[in-house]
Image: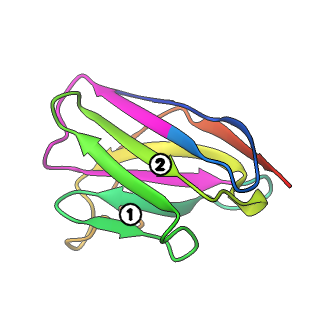
């Protein structure tokens, strides 16, 4: 099972990026698919996830949109109005979730990360 994240890069504040996470080796249609990020010197934090509903961290609500294409076994993260504080390595993850939620925990599979840098 592999999760391949892509789409990171350097963008100016206010700009947009779209990240992709392609899954292979199994289907994750009933699983949570999520994005986490880790900034330098910081702990990894939850960003957003999707299963039957979507979940967002307060810091990205209204700016980021998660979506998934079941046919392609791929999840996307559209990031708009980017801020310097969004700078981090972004990781996609898949798992059953925990306690009926996709927020924060219950992820068994992790991608390699894609770096996002937002300049001011």
So how many labels did they put on this image?
2
**CB under 8 Å between discs 2 and 1:** no
Looking at the picture, does residue 112 appear above or below residue 83? above
Say which quarter of the image contains residue 8: top right
> Can residue 49 be seen from the camera position used here?
yes
Of residue 68 and residue 102, the one placed in the foreground of this image is: 68
Magenta-span inclusion, residue 37: yes
Cα–Cα span, label 2 and label 1: 22 Å
Of residue 22 and residue 109, the one placed in the foreground of this image is: 22
Q: Which residues are magenta?
A: 19-38
Of residue 120 and residue 112, the one placed in the foreground of this image is: 120
Looking at the picture, does residue 80 appear above or below residue 59? above
Magenta-span inclusion, residue 99: no
Q: Residue furthest bottom?
A: 58
- Left or right: where 73 falls relative to 41: left
Residue at label 1? 105
Residue 35, image x, y percentages: 46, 51
Label 1 secondary element:
loop
Looking at the picture, does residue 50 appear above or below residue 109? below
Residue 6, image x, y percentages: 52, 29
Q: Quadrant of the C terminus?
A: bottom right
- Left or right: where 18 falls relative to 13: left
Residue at label 2? 78
């Amino acid at each position: 099972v592999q999760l391949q994240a892509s789409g990171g890069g350097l963008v100016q504040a206010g700009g947009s990026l779209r990240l992709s996470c392609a899954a292979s080796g199994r289907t994750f249609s009933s699983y949570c698919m999520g994005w986490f990020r880790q900034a330098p010197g910081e702990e990894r934090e939850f960003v957003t996830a999707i299963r039957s509903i979507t979940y967002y961290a307060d810091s990205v609500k209204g700016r980021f949109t998660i979506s998934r294409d079941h046919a392609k076994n791929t999840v996307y993260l559209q990031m708009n109005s980017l801020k310097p504080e969004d700078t981090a390595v972004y990781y996609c993850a898949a798992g059953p979730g925990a306690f009926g939620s996709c927020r924060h925990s219950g992820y068994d599979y992790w991608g390699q990360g894609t770096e996002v840098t937002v300049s001011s």
